[in-house]
Image (tube, helix red, strand yellow):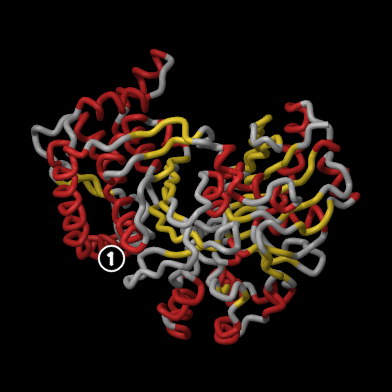
Amino acid sequence: MTQYILAHDLGTSGNKATLYGLDGILAASVLCEYPTFTPHPGWVEQNPDDWWQAVCTGTQQLLQKAGVQPGQVAAISFSAQMMGCLLVDAKGQPLRNMIIWADTRAAKQEKEMEELLGMEFVYRTTGHRISASYSAAKLLWVRENEPEVYAKAAKMLHAKDYIIHKLCGQFVTDYSDASGTNLFDINTKEWSMPILQALDINPALLPNAYPSATVAGGVSTRAAAETGLLQGTPVVIGGGDGSCACVGAGVVKEGTAYNVLGSSSWISLASKTPVYDKEMRTFNWVHLDENLYTPCGTMQAAGYSYQWYKNVLCGAETHAAAQAGSSPYKLIDEGAAQAKPGAGGLLYLPYLLGERSPRWNHEARGAFVGLSVNSSKGDISRAVLEGVGFNLRVILDILRAGHPIQEITMIGGGAKGAVWLQILADIWQLPLQLPTYREEATSMGAAICGGVAIGAYQGYNVIEKMNKPQQTVQPNPKLAPLYNNLYAAFNTAYQNLVPTYTQLAAFNQAYP
């Protein structure tokens, strides 16, 4: 009887339940969406019960869609959004909504952490800068602002950790998710006692951390009834979405690299050791393979920049596409392709949401620099795509300063756009590999993790057979001088605009 791995990818907008055969072939997938709540500016929360409902519904629909019996599911594994803070009681009941990764309310706690611990100490210990985006600052915010909730808390969990407890009753996490808390020593792979002591956090509040390919337990009788799975089905911890994407992209050997081109975008590689940048512009996760790390840089508004541009400035293309039954992005791409490389000297700075890596400037904002009466709509379209490429190149240059990179595997929704892919290859001057599964790479990484945990696969390198490159986009070496010059101008433009960003931030505070 054919066996399958069930992977749940708990994203920001919904849970994608995916079923893979042990041969790596996708059998079916189902998406169940859930809401996000923003009760105040900078606050972003989700209800854990919505995740559980999505997991239960998605599992049932998936098995029915694929025509698979519960007994054919060899294991359940997980990928999920990272850097959250969910406090539960001793029975695993949520005490409040989860504060998710996008929440920035803990700016005060971020500053307090830096005063207590110092930025470089935390960066060298946890692999990350101190930030309100990470779990630690969020936890301190709850302690200060909701002391009654904090007093009742037995554990702080991430999204997948909560679902695992619902399935098998265990409080666990994995190294990759733990490395997004600002509390985990990625060198020893243990919770950092110096950080916990300095912040006066009880270590018992944190779940035990294990390698991603660890079986947490079996599906309980109650969970079996709610999900439609068989009691006792192995529940594998899995990992954070970034580390799962790394495996799904085939980045399982030192020096190999990939780029996720989605709403946000990141470049990461596999390394036997963490990569520490002197200016702390990039950061480090633990890989699903506990013997590897994934040095990484993440920009906020990649595909989001393209979406914003389409929604705000491309009404004509949107209308024409609707009339033709086509995609507006196809029409925008055609305009960008007709424009000359370099967009006539027009630069786009993609800081619509501030910026994480490489700038780490929440005051930064988007800008077009170099507009003239000769700027065409195609130039503007191309500038948006090139601007994202320039910003990602900053991250890429930091990473390849210590690790030579020969090529990059592309995954995510943006990896479908041929025009954008060629622009990126030309700016980076690297070949881009396009695997079979691009949008499913994250869930495939979780599935591979599940297979490793139950012994179906000998190691993560099985992905090299399951998600092979189908196409290569080669860079045009003749464009290297042009893009090198514009890249220098892009960085100069950002640096010169920093004081303006600060002035505008003060203006927005004075005149909200």
Residue 212 % position (x, y)? 66, 58
Residue 225 % position (x, y)? 88, 43
Q: Quadrant of the C terminus?
A: bottom left
Q: Is residue 382 above or below residue 427?
A: above
Residue 361, quarter of the rendered image? bottom left
Q: Quadrant of the N terminus?
A: top right
Residue 33 % position (x, y)? 63, 39
What number of labels is visible? 1
Q: Residue most toward the left?
A: 373
- 462 vs 432, left or right, is right
Q: Is residue 429 above or below residue 124?
A: above
Q: Residue most toward the top?
A: 324
Could you classify mark 1 by the number of other residues whose Cα lies within 10 Å: few (under 14), some (14-19), or many (20 or more)?
A: few
Which residue is painted at 67% across and 68% down in the image?
A: 209
- 419 vs 447, left or right, is left
- 472 vs 507, left or right, is right
Residue 442, quarter of the rendered image? top right
What residue is pinned by disc 1? 506
Kindly state the secondary structure of the residue where label 1 is placed.
Answer: helix
Q: Nearer the viewer, residue 287 or 158?
A: 287
Q: Is residue 312 in view?
A: no
Which residue is painted at 72% across and 77% down in the image?
A: 204
Residue 320 % position (x, y)? 34, 17
Q: Which amino acid, mark 1?
A: Ala
Which residue is painted at 74% across and 72% down in the image?
A: 154
- 84 vs 114, left or right, is right
Q: Nearer the viewer, residue 90 or 124?
A: 124
Which residue is painted at 52% across and 32% down in the image?
A: 436
Q: Is residue 139 above or below residue 302?
A: below
